[in-house]
């Protein structure tokens, strides 16, 4: 792959890129399930070996992608179905214990920047129980015990001067949760997945990696407890949009008798060469630009309810 890497946080898109190039990756397994009645597709990308992790550029573990074509629509019943499917996936990744567990939910991101406000808005809609149980006892919500849920929105380094990892270290040391669930906005390789795809993984997350801001990772190794990361892509790299447009243009030109020669010469370039060419042609200002849909404020508001409902079902039902 050399220096070529289209920015994406989705393991599914990374795997698809290798499939497009007819590259087989040993140690990476794919499992797919389609729920026809709700048009939801669930894809498991299982990275099982160190070799697979090295090629994919992601840690070993489970990467579960829930694709819902109508997730961007204002359909409460459909969003409820997505929340229920999300809850099933989250439950399958939670630690198995006989007693109720303690879960810390972390809303990563900057609430002042709309595409990055997913984590903070999800945290606002959660059913928080830890303080009530500490005050009134384990049966505070009825005859059955419930999980102890707490949440925090650590902000971003520009606001706090601290890494999210540093803040969480202190919180985890004091509250001693059995599991951490991290919510964050992601970057995608394809515009068709913006606000329509949810990725759930048991490998944790590197905040800001999708937009080139590499921060200390939040994972089981760094936190000392299992970390589940949930994210939805809200931005796409400008160079990626141009790259996809160029690929479509080349395909169309190759089919035209008039432009066949020009289209064929451009098609001779591999994906890495095309992408590098585009990044060179883009001005420095455009080269670092990320694009988000115009209705992103409404999408974030709607999706934050969908994710929080899925979490509430998984953790409190």
Image (tube, rainbow, N blue to C red):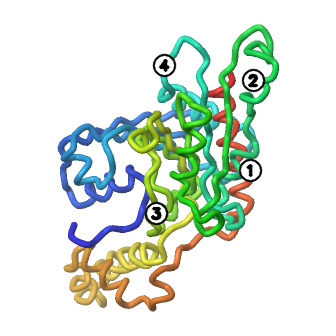
Give the label on residue 210, or none. Answer: 3
Mark 3 vs mark 4: give the one in front. Answer: 4
Instruction: Give the labeled residue for mark 1.
Output: 74
Q: Is residue 171 left or right of residue 286?
A: right
How far apart are the alpha carbons under marks 3 and 4? 31 Å
Residue 147 coordinates in the image, percent (x, y) = 65, 22
Mark 2, secondary structure of its residue: helix
Asked whether residue 78 appears in the rendered view, the answer is: no
Instruction: Give the labeled residue for mark 2.
Output: 134
Label 1–label 2 contact, CB within 8 A: no
Residue 313 coordinates in the image, percent (x, y) = 67, 28
How far apart are the alpha carbons under marks 4 and 1? 35 Å
Q: Earlier in the sequence, mark 4 or mark 2?
A: 4
Q: Which of marks 3 and 1 is nearer the N terminus?
A: 1
In front: 64, or 266? 64
How far apart are the alpha carbons under marks 3 and 2? 38 Å
Determine crowd level at label 2: few under 14, some 14-19, many 20+ residues with C-alpha closer than 10 A. Answer: few
Residue 125 coordinates in the image, percent (x, y) = 75, 42
In front: 139, or 47? 139
**Residue at 61% from the left image edge and 69% from the top image edge:** 158
Mark 3 vs mark 2: give the one in front. Answer: 2
Asked whether residue 308 appears in the rendered view, the answer is: yes
How far apart are the alpha carbons under marks 4 and 2? 22 Å
Determine crowd level at label 1: few under 14, some 14-19, many 20+ residues with C-alpha closer than 10 A. Answer: few
Q: Quadrant of residue 14?
A: bottom left
How far apart are the alpha carbons under marks 1 and 2? 38 Å
Label 3–label 4 contact, CB within 8 A: no
Give the label on residue 90, or none. Answer: none
Mark 3, secondary structure of its residue: helix
Q: Is residue 74 left or right of residue 216?
A: right
Instruction: Give the labeled residue for mark 4.
Output: 96
């Amino acid at each position: 792959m050399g220096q070529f890497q289209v920015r994406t946080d989705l393991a599914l898109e990374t795997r698809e890129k290798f499939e497009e190039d007819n590259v087989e990756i040993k140690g990476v397994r794919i499992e797919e399930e389609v729920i026809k009645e709700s048009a939801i597709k669930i894809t498991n990308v299982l990275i099982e070996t160190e070799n697979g992790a090295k090629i994919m550029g992601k840690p070993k573990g489970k990467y579960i992608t829930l694709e819902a074509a109508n997730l961007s629509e204002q359909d409460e019943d459909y969003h409820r179905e997505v929340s229920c499917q999300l809850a099933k996936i989250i439950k399958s990744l939670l630690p198995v214990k006989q007693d109720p567990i303690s879960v810390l939910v972390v809303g990563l991101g900057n609430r002042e920047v709309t595409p990055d406000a997913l984590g903070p808005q999800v945290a606002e809609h959660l059913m928080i129980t830890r303080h009530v149980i500490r005050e009134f006892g384990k049966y505070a919500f009825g005859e059955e015990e419930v999980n102890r849920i707490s949440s925090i929105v650590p902000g971003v380094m520009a606001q706090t001067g601290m890494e999210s990892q540093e803040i969480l270290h202190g919180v985890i040391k004091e509250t001693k949760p059995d599991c951490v669930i991290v919510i964050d906005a992601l970057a995608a390789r394809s515009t068709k997945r913006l606000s329509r795809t949810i990725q759930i993984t048991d490998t944790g997350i590197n905040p800001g990696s999708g937009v080139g801001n590499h921060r200390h990772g939040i994972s089981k190794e760094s936190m000392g407890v299992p970390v589940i990361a949930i994210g939805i892509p809200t931005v796409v790299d400008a160079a990626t949009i141009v790259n996809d447009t160029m690929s479509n243009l080349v395909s169309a030109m190759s089919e035209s008798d008039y432009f066949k020669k020009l289209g064929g010469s451009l098609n001779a370039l591999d994906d890495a060469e095309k992408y590098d060419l585009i990044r060179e042609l883009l001005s420095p200002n455009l080269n670092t630009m990320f694009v988000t849909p115009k209705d992103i404020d409404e999408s974030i508001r709607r999706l934050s309810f969908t994710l929080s409902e899925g979490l509430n079902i998984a953790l409190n039902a």
